[in-house]
């Protein structure tokens, strides 16, 4: 038989359940699921399953309130998803731009190495060419 959960874990689960059911989730993005409850309470699902009375109370509360499991909070979640999608799109564009810059810098570095090798191999290496009007 599994051991009961600590008072601290039970309190965290009950507080998380209240936040999820009232639409004030902080960590689980409003997922009305056992996994969402565990995530919101910051406990493992194994810990949650050792408290079947909390799981049952959570499922009853979802049914009693007529809430849909794994549903997000309407307009707020739609706006959040839209913002996240926009941010992801911007980050992907930035990643492409950075990759292009890296490629251009790599090509410039290769060209610089070629020039250095060509100058190192030239016969004028080690000779000093005086400019007109200067004496040594």
Image (tube, rainbow, N blue to C red):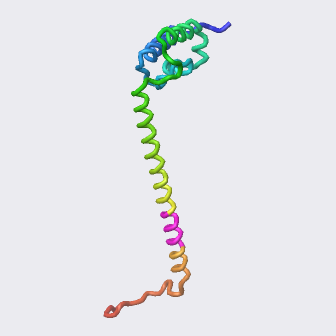
Q: Nearer the viewer, residue 46 or 31?
A: 31
Residue 7 x, y percent position in the rendering? 50, 8
- The residue furthest front is 66
Q: Quadrant of the N terminus?
A: top right
For the point 43% across and 41% down, the residue is: 87
Where residue 86 sits, quadrant-wise, is top left
Establish if 92 lies above or below 132.
above
Residue bounds of the magenta highlight: 104-113
Where residue 21 sits, quadrant-wise, is top left
| Number of marks in the rendered image | 0
Residue 82 x, y percent position in the rendering? 43, 36
Establish if 43 lies above or below 130.
above
Residue 17 x, y percent position in the rendering? 47, 14
Does residue 22 belong to the magenta stretch? Answer: no
Residue 132 x, y percent position in the rendering? 34, 93
- The residue furthest left is 133
User: In the drawing, does residue 42 fall left or right of residue 80?
Assistant: right
For the point 42% across and 19% down, the residue is: 23
**SS majority, magenta:** helix
- The residue furthest right is 1
Q: Nearer the viewer, residue 44 or 8?
A: 44
Does residue 110 belong to the magenta stretch? Answer: yes
Q: Quadrant of the C terminus?
A: bottom left
């Amino acid at each position: 038989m599994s051991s009961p959960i600590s008072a601290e874990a039970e309190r965290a689960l009950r507080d998380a359940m209240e936040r999820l059911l009232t639409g004030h989730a902080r960590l689980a993005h409003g997922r009305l699921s056992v996994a969402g409850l565990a995530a919101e309470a910051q406990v493992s699902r194994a810990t949650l399953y050792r408290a079947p009375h909390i799981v049952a109370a959570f499922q009853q509360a979802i049914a009693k309130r007529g809430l849909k499991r794994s549903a997000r909070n309407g307009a707020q979640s739609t706006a959040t998803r839209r913002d996240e999608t926009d941010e992801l799109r911007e980050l992907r564009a930035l990643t492409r731009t950075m990759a292009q810059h890296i490629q251009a810098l790599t090509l410039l570095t290769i060209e610089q190495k070629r020039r250095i090798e060509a100058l190192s191999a030239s016969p004028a290496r080690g000779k000093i060419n005086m400019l007109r009007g200067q004496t040594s």
